[in-house]
Amino acid sequence: MSSLADNALPPLGLRERKKAKTLAAIQAAALKLFRKQGYDATTIEQIAAAAEVSPSTFFRYFPTKEDVVLLDLTDPLVIEAFRAQPPELSAIQALRNAVRSVFDQLPDDEFEVIRQREELILANPELQARMLGEIAGMVRLVADVAAERTGRRADEFELRVAAGALMGVAFGLMLTELDASPRDLIALFDAGLEQLETGIKL
Amino acid sequence: MSSLADNALPPLGLRERKKAKTLAAIQAAALKLFRKQGYDATTIEQIAAAAEVSPSTFFRYFPTKEDVVLLDLTDPLVIEAFRAQPPELSAIQALRNAVRSVFDQLPDDEFEVIRQREELILANPELQARMLGEIAGMVRLVADVAAERTGRRADEFELRVAAGALMGVAFGLMLTELDASPRDLIALFDAGLEQLETGIKL
DNA sequence: TATGATTTGACAGCGACTACCAATTAGTAG
DNA sequence: CTACTAATTGGTAGTCGCTGTCAAATCATA
């Protein structure tokens, strides 16, 4: 997660740089151990030792063991990009563009880390549950931005159904198309959106 | 959760009856303490003491503290009813009928327990996350049954899009209709399914 | 260099949970 | 009814994730 350090606030001094470095080290150590021996079998002590910090320091950087895996920086980028889309686009078009622009710009190594995190999440029920909570939060945010764009209230029923469906499809595809490239995912998302627009016929 | 005892296998002896009674007592004690002092502030020891069992017995009945709240007997009924719908109905219609039929037959006191469980779930992030996991599992089952009904494979793209959308809608409603009764939630879910059928226009 | 601010390490303790063994209860056969 | 077996329960030790506290270490500044 070297990108994490790069994407943090501009380093202001040794202290800040050291913090970013420590956070990245902890997370890298954790992800490595999880892959090697499994999430449940990996203890906080092991992670802390591998990252050369104490367990209490671990908890200063990550509130819970789960958060090492769950930390995700792309979602806020998607929301930001969604907000920045030209106002004349429909909300669905705008969301398409936002997802596309974020994933098009992801370096391969970052995408690889995302993939690995997703594999971990799929393999562990507690992580899945947490991830679903994140997804639900995303639904809310997308509904808010879509409301801004369409001049509706964010709590309108139709809007919330739509936002839920859109994000459900997005995450559903991400979590089932584990071998897809970013480009493929975007294409699949597009096809899914199209289907949502025309209606689910089952 | 007296319905739990009633809905268990027919009591075959003192042993079975005692088990059902203990399980119900643990769950009732837990729900009562959670309401009185909050989920996090209630310990397993307190629950066990209130139910007059030992903590190790608690864990024989419920795998985790969360499961006391999460245990839900309506989902299997919905799946069963979904499977039993006439084959000429579309899958979405069949699902709507199934949900309706199960909830229409629930006694009011069961609804009240469902409502209380939902309040607890909405007040506690870990419970929310677990609940979302249950919903996701339910959607997967629904997709499987829908595949059976429509003669498709459950991993077909269209079916996966539908499942994702369904999950997204359920999440969206679950976490935003905070004041809705369980019955209202069912009605809203139904309306959401209808919207999925006709298409998302944003 | 001295001092104050910040970060880290160590440790005690809590609660959820696991696993084991002895005690208790229920069921069955003679 | 008694004796024996099977099933269930209680008690306990221990692990792990996590919280909070305090002392030590490190960084920043005058």
Image (cartoon, coloured by chain):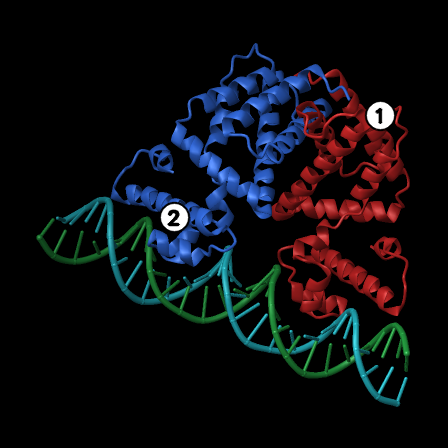
Chain colours: A red, B blue, C cyan, D green
| Percent coordinates x, y for residue C11 in the rendering | 60, 78
Residue type, label 1 = Gln
Residue with the mark numbered 2 = B29
On screen, residue A128 versus residue B8, left or right, reads right
Q: Is residue A3 visible?
A: yes
Chain letter for mark 2, please: B
Q: Which chain carries label 1?
A: A
Callout 1: 10 Å neighbours few (<14), some, many (20+)? some
Cβ–Cβ under 8 Å for marks 1 and 2: no
Q: In this view, does B172 lie to the left or right of B83?
A: right
Where residue D12 appears, as percent x and y from the top left, is 40, 69
Q: Residue at x 62, y 26 (%)?
A: B143
Q: Is residue B64 visible?
A: no
The image quarter in which residue A97 lies? top right
Sort mark 2 into few (<14), some (14-19) or many (20+) by Cα contacts within 10 Å.
some
Which residue is rendered at x = 48% and y = 39% of the image? B117
Quadrant position of residue C4: bottom right
Image coordinates for residue B55, horizontal then vertical, percent: 41, 57
- Give the camera-side residue of A12 and B171: A12
Q: What residue type is labelled 2?
A: Ala
Indicate the position of residue A156 as horizontal and vertical percent values. Answer: 68, 26
**In terms of depth relative to the viewer, which is nearer, B12 or B163?**
B163
Give the label on residue B118, or none: none
- Identify the image quadrant of residue C6: bottom right
Relative side of B163 to A6, left or right: left
Image quadrant in which the C terminus of chain B is located = top right
Front-lying residue, D14 or B201: B201
Q: In which quarter of the image is the N terminus of chain B?
A: top left
Residue A93 circle label: 1
Q: Is residue A70 above or below residue A54?
A: above
Q: Residue at x 58, y 35 (%)?
A: B178
